[in-house]
Structures are given as structure tokens and as C-alpha cells.
Image (tube, helix red, strand yellow):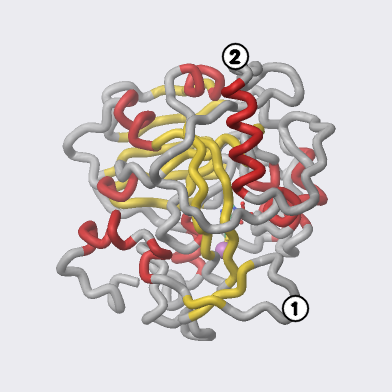
Amino acid sequence: MAGRFKSDLNWSDVTPKSAFLNRRQLMAGAGAVALGSIGGPALAKLDAAPSKFSTDAEPNSLEEITTYNNYYEFGTGKEDPARYADALTTDPWTVKIDGLVDKPGDYAFDDIMKNVTLEERIYRFRCVEAWSMVIPWAGFELADLLTRAGVQPGAKYIAFETAVRPEEMPGISRGYLEWPYREGLRIDEAMHPLTIMATGLYDEPIPNQNGAPLRLVVPWKYGFKSIKSVVRISAMDREPPTSWNMANAREYGFYSNVNPEVDHPRWSQASERKVGGGLFAKRQPTLMFNGYGDEVASLYEGMDLSKNF
Ligand SMILES: Nc1nc2c(c(=O)[nH]1)N[C@H]1C(S)=C(S)[C@@H](COP(=O)(O)O)O[C@H]1N2
Ligand SMILES: [Mo]
């Protein structure tokens, strides 16, 4: 696997949640002090605390999560990010926070990490292309960071941008999209406790192909909303332009909530293929809001979700 840190671990086999938890419990039982932190030695465990928001569904293996990716800055093939993203320099890393905030500025990644609480969040993940995974992220609530920056009352939306590094990202010169990759959320979506900035995967620093050193994860929306390798977060008073919507507004709306009842113009969204299930695995039904309706349906009360798709 590629990543910010070299790892001797090879979890290419399936790592079910039970084994994963056992390892965590062993560490806890041994009274393990936090085994290093971000910026620490190779093999540093993040030691993220378990969360009530985690699903019981079976996580995909590290191998699956890190070899089947969408990250167009490195190419459009599912294996391109694993092949090329090693070249991305993720240390040092700075996130510019600007717009309608009390404390705008360039925030160093290491400084951000000192001021947040890391949790393990095992989330369902549903790509608009109708494949899905279950991913054990480690991360912190975006609300923590926004609160620290002091989002002002006039802010109605949060916009995000990915790094643009033509010399490190072979996809940039190909113009698949207009760079930087951009995404956005309404302020209540951004402040929702399910919305995290992921900095880890399987309790280790997140590999480059998954969006190192920090990427957004919004589990009730199609995967393309979960923008990778974020360098800019802006609080705005209006809906920001977003990459896939700019590329094709008919196919990709601003909201892009997972919705089995609203088909993509070119395919059904009623079911999905869980990655790793094998050639003959049955498709599984797609759930409204990707199964997070109890937590988020109220955000969209009164909205026509077939118009605001
Ligand atoms: N910067 C950037 N972020 C991105 C993408 C991308 O191409 N560039 N692809 C998106 C899409 S379509 C998906 S499905 C997810 C994939 O995340 P994963 O590779 O960690 O599974 O990342 C999203 N974030
Ligand atoms: Mo996607």
C-alpha cells in the first residue's frame, strides 16, 4: 500500500471487525499508552476511540479499500491512485481556512491534529457508480475544526478544495475535471456529527490514495462528495460550485444524498455491488441516505429530494 508512512503490516486478507476490535482490546488491556501519534514513527497506531456511529456491517479489507479507488488527480482507472499517489507530498501539509470565520489562516495539519479528538468510525460508503464498501475510518468531527475557526452566523455553506500538484499528480494535465477538485456542504450538513475529516484507516494514517493527510467523509451522500487531500475550507454565504455538478449538472446535484428512488440518468440507484463480494455475489439494496436516515432525514424536511438531488 502507498501512504504517508511506510508500513510492514500487510493486511491483504480480510480483517473482520471482530479481529480488529480484539486487537484494540488487547492494546487497551495491556494498558498500552498511545503508541505514538501523527508525525511519529512508522507503525504508529492512531488509537482512535470507538464510536456509537459505527456500523456493525462487515468492513472491507485494507487491500480492497486501498486498491479500488477514485482519485482522478492520479488518473481515472480504479488502480491508478494506488499506483501513483505515493508521489504526493503530505508532510508538511497546510489547510487554509477562510471566508466567514473569526480566525482565518493557514492551519498546519499537525496543529489541527493536536486539537481534535480522533474516533474510529466504521461507515458504509456508497459511490454514485453503484458500488459500495464498509470502511473503518479514523477521524474527527468537521464541526470541531469549524468551531475552532469560529464560523460566523452569516455562513450558510462550507466549500472544500483538494491540492493541485501537477508535478505529483499525473491526472492534472489530462483535464478530466476542472481543478482544483471542489466540493461543498450546507452548514448544517457540515456541522452534523456524522460528518468527519478522516485522517486514518484501520487505525493507521490514511494512505495517499484514500486522501491523505485528511479528507472529508459524509457517509449519507454519494462518495464524490467526500473530497480528498483537502487544502482549503471556506465558509460562504452562498452555495459553492462543486466539481461534478460543474462537469454535469443533470447527472450530479449539489446534495447527492444516497437515494434508491432517484436514479442516475444512465443507471439505477436501487441496488449496489459491495466491492470484494466476488463475481457471483448478489447485489444489495441501496438504503435511503445510505442507512443514515434516522440521523439525517430531518435535515431535508420539506425538500423535494427528486428536484434537490
Ligand atoms: N480530490 C478528489 N476527491 C475525491 C475524488 C477525486 O477524484 N478527487 N473521487 C471521489 C469519489 S467519486 C469517490 S467514490 C471517493 C472514493 O474514495 P476512496 O477511494 O477512498 O474509496 O472519493 C471522492 N473524492
Ligand atoms: Mo464515486
| For the residues bearing labels 1 and 2, Cβ distance under 8 angstroms | no
Which of pointers 1 and 2 indicates the residue nearer the eye?
2
* Image-based side of 149 in relation to 214, left or right: left
Query: Which of the four quarters of the rendered structure image does ligand 1 lie in?
Result: bottom right
Q: CA distance from mark 1 to mark 2?
A: 43 Å
Q: What x and y, as percent, mark residue 140?
A: 45, 33
| Cβ of mark 2 under 8 A from ligand 1 | no
Q: What x and y, as percent, mark residue 268?
A: 50, 84
* Image-based side of 219 in relation to 214, left or right: left
Residue 3, by quadrant, is top right
Residue closest to the eye, 79 or 200: 200
Q: Which residue is mark 1?
A: 279
Within-10-Å neighbours for mark 1: few <14, some 14–19, many 20+:
few
Q: Residue at x 65, y 34 (%)?
A: 23
Q: Which residue is mark 2?
A: 33
Q: Residue at x 70, y 49 (%)?
A: 15
* Residue 171 to residue 103: above or below: below
Q: Residue at x 48, y 22 (%)?
A: 112
Mark 1: secondary structure: loop
Q: Quadrant of the N terminus?
A: top right
